[in-house]
Image: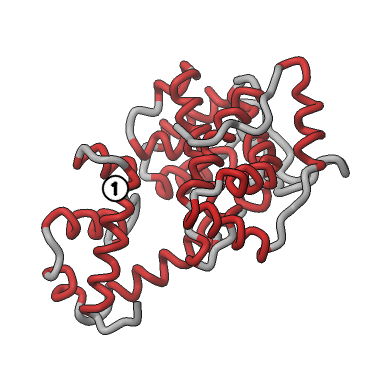
Amino acid sequence: MTDFALPLQIHGASLQSYIQAVNRLPYLSQEEELDLSRRLRQKNDLDAARQLVLSHLRVVVSVARGYTGYGLPQADLIQEGNIGLMKAVKRFDPDRGVRLVSFAIHWIKAEIHEYIIRNWRLVKVATTKAQRKLFFNLRSLKEGTDALNREEIGQIATSLKVKPEEVSEMETRLGGRDIPLEPVSDEEEGIAPIAYLADENSEPTRLIERKQKEKLLGEGLTNALASLDDRSRRIIEARWLQEEDSATLHELAAEFEVSAERIRQIEQKAMQKMKLALGAPK
């Protein structure tokens, strides 16, 4: 799955020691992060990859805390999140103008979500994409710890495109254990859930995607799309031109029976070709 070993392994009896250890690991400056990322991307420098992973392990711990309410071992959630972090490090492009932490959170969450779906029996109620979105977002959409009233249920149902009764059922099934959104002690360094649950649309990667989408939807889009082959056009439309629920690299990889990395490469080439057709700089 990765070309470098997980730097730190978690053992159930020493989970707290592991958390304390990763919180003591040094942060990287933006310049250090860029240098290491370019060394990895250009020279396949595995020591650079290791340093990038180590410096972001505390982020995984913080994200994993957001899923303790599902009743699964925190050590397992962290391990799965670490896999997501390593995938993010391998795929990170330092020249996109986004810090690694913003890019990595998506991959960390994705691995944790998959783990929960595989191991938590109650997730079987979430059979559609909309219901899965409800499953993973209900806690953050609630304004407090009290039970939802009818108006709040209706608002959440409309927002996530599910039935009101599905919101009520999911709240009942999930019922109960909430986690603090902010660190509760000085030892809990790093990024707390409040940093990314408040407004996902404000994350740098989302802002960049939104700007690129707006640019593509401008004048000349039809001609630019026409310059692409069928597969490239399908990937661009699914990734960038959907009003919501844009396709992921993994979904398109399954559709075309290639790797997610191959889809990313096709997407990059198609975007460059469209930018030329639109008269935009490379």
Q: Is residue 12 left or right of residue 232?
A: right
Badge 1 element: helix
Q: Is residue 144 visible?
A: no
- Looking at the rendered structure, the kind of residue marked 1 is Arg
Q: Is residue 198 visible?
A: yes
Q: Position of residue 269 (x, y in %)?
A: 27, 63
Depth check: give the residue in front, 144 or 3: 3
Q: What residue is shown at x 68% (from left), y 30% (from top)?
A: 8
Q: How is the image coloured?
A: secondary structure
Q: What residue is shown at x 75% (from left), y 38% (from top)?
A: 22
Q: Is residue 161 left or right of residue 105?
A: left
Pick out the residue farthest to the right: 186
Q: Position of residue 199 (x, y in %)?
A: 57, 56
Near mark 1 (Cα within 10 A), the count class, few <14, some 14-19 or many ≥20, is some
Q: Position of residue 150 (x, y in %)?
A: 51, 40
Which of the image's four quarters has the C terminus? bottom left
For residue 202, what is the image quadrant?
A: bottom right
For residue 56, what is the image quadrant?
A: top right
Q: What residue is shown at x 53% (from left), y 53% (from top)?
A: 103
Q: Position of residue 192 (x, y in %)?
A: 71, 46
Depth check: give the residue in front, 99 or 154: 99
Q: What residue is shown at x 79% (from left), y 26% (from top)?
A: 16
Residue under numbered circle 1: 262
- Identify whether 231 is placed above or below 171: below
Which of the image's four quarters has the N terminus? top left
